[in-house]
């Protein structure tokens, strides 16, 4: 079962529709900042992942998948490792590692701030 | 007392009435704090606390903005029981404002995360069916000036 989370910049890009000439540069900037922060969140999730003998290879299975379409950029930070969900959320007895939750909790506000700063610089 | 301690007390009081109303021991719900005892009840909430953080307030830049997350794992013998327990945890905690000395707490919010909607069997338990599901909650509070 896959575990992970999505950061979706399409809402920010929708707001930029009416900016004419600047739109292309802003959309490129949003995509760049989103990709950069998705990589940071992936690194944070990997750093928080268990690395014992029973979970060998799990940290490296955490990866970023990016979809770029007309409406925006969407990055998914996830692991398709079979232990992904049980490690993230724990079980009936076992502790949750919360590596995706922690990465999102700190990474998403930083990404939103960076998006705001980058776009403000262009306007 | 921390915010999560208050949340655990809230869950305990929420299930207490239902526990008092039943004579069937298999329907009793326990609340465990980060540890499951050797002989747990068949239905329980297991609460896990994650690290909290202290941020600067936007208004004055002072580091007084405290927040954190915690997880409630609901455990039972069937999917329906786990779903009902998760509903009860959400009813008890979402929108509830903890009262904690030294903190001005905001209402508890659910963490939106589509992955956590899964209710699954715990495959590490071989001799019987044990199902579980998780709900995460975010708390936020301001330290007094």
Image: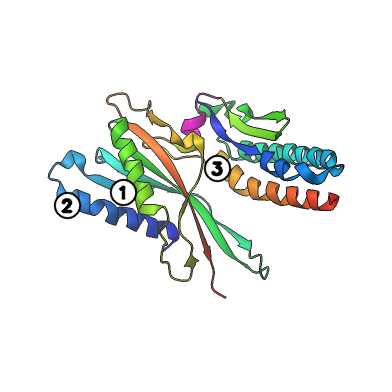
Q: Which residue is mark 3?
A: A101
Residue B17 drawn at (x, y percent): 21, 53
Q: How is the image coloured?
A: rainbow
In the image, B70 versus A5, the foreground residue is: A5
Q: Is residue B104 above or below residue B4?
A: below
Q: Could you classify mark 3 by the number of other residues whose Cα lies within 10 Å: few (under 14), some (14-19), or many (20 or more)?
A: many
Question: Is residue A46 placed above or below A112 in the rendered structure?
Answer: above
- Depth check: give the residue in front, A12 or A6: A12
Q: Which residue, as the protein is rendered here, is positioned at the far bottom?
A: B145
Q: Which residues are magenta?
A: A81-87
Residue A31, compared with residue A118, is above or below; it is above
In the rendered image, residue A55, in percent from the top left (x then y), is placed at 53, 28
Q: CA distance from mark 2 to mark 1?
A: 15 Å
Q: Earlier in the sequence, mark 2 or mark 1?
A: 2
Quadrant of res B98: bottom left
Crowding at dot 1, Cα within 10 Å, few <14 / some 14-19 / many 20+, comes out as many
Residue A47 found in image quarter: top right
Evaluate whether label 3 is on the same chain as label 2.
no
Same subunit, labels 1 and 3: the answer reads no
Which label number is shown at residue B31?
1
To which residue does mark 2 refer? B20
Q: Residue A52: tell me if it is visible.
A: no
Q: Secondary structure at mark 1?
A: strand
Which residue is the extreme one toward the left? B23
**Secondary structure found at label 2:** helix
Other-residue count near label 2 (Cα within 10 Å), few / some / many at <14 / 14–19 / ≥20? few
Q: Where is residue B123 drawn, in percent x and y? A: 38, 25
- What is the C-alpha distance between the residues marked 3 and 2? 36 Å
Q: Looking at the rendered structure, which numbered label has been put on residue A67? A: none
Query: How many numbered circles are shown?
Result: 3
Residue at point 53%, 52% (across, down):
B51
Q: What is the spatial separation of the Cα atoms under label 1 and label 3, in whole angstroms? A: 23 Å
């Amino acid at each position: 079962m896959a575990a992970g989370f999505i950061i979706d910049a399409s809402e920010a890009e929708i707001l930029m529709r009416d900016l004419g000439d600047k739109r292309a540069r802003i959309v490129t900037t949003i995509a760049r900042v989103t990709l950069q922060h998705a990589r940071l969140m992936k690194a944070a999730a990997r750093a928080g992942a268990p690395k014992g003998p029973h979970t060998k290879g799990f940290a490296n299975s955490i990866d970023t998948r990016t979809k770029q379409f007309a409406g925006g950029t969407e990055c998914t930070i996830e692991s398709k490792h079979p232990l992904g969900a049980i490690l993230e959320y724990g079980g009936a007895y076992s502790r949750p590692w919360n590596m995706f939750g922690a990465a999102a909790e700190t990474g998403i506000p930083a990404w939103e701030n960076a998006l705001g700063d980058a776009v403000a610089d262009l306007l | 007392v921390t915010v999560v301690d208050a949340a655990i007390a809230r869950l305990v009081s929420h299930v207490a009435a239902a526990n008092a109303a039943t004579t069937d021991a298999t329907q009793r719900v326990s609340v465990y704090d980060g540890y499951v005892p050797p002989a747990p009840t068949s239905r329980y909430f297991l609460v896990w606390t994650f690290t909290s953080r202290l941020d600067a307030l936007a208004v004055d830049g002072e580091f007084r903005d405290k927040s954190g997350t915690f997880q409630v794992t609901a455990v039972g013998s069937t999917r329906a029981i786990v779903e009902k327990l998760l509903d009860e945890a959400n009813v008890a905690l979402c929108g509830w404002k903890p009262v904690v000395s030294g903190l001005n707490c905001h209402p508890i919010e659910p963490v939106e995360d589509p992955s956590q909607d899964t209710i699954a069997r715990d495959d590490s338990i071989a001799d019987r069916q044990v199902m579980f599901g998780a709900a995460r909650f975010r708390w936020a509070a301001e330290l007094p000036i």
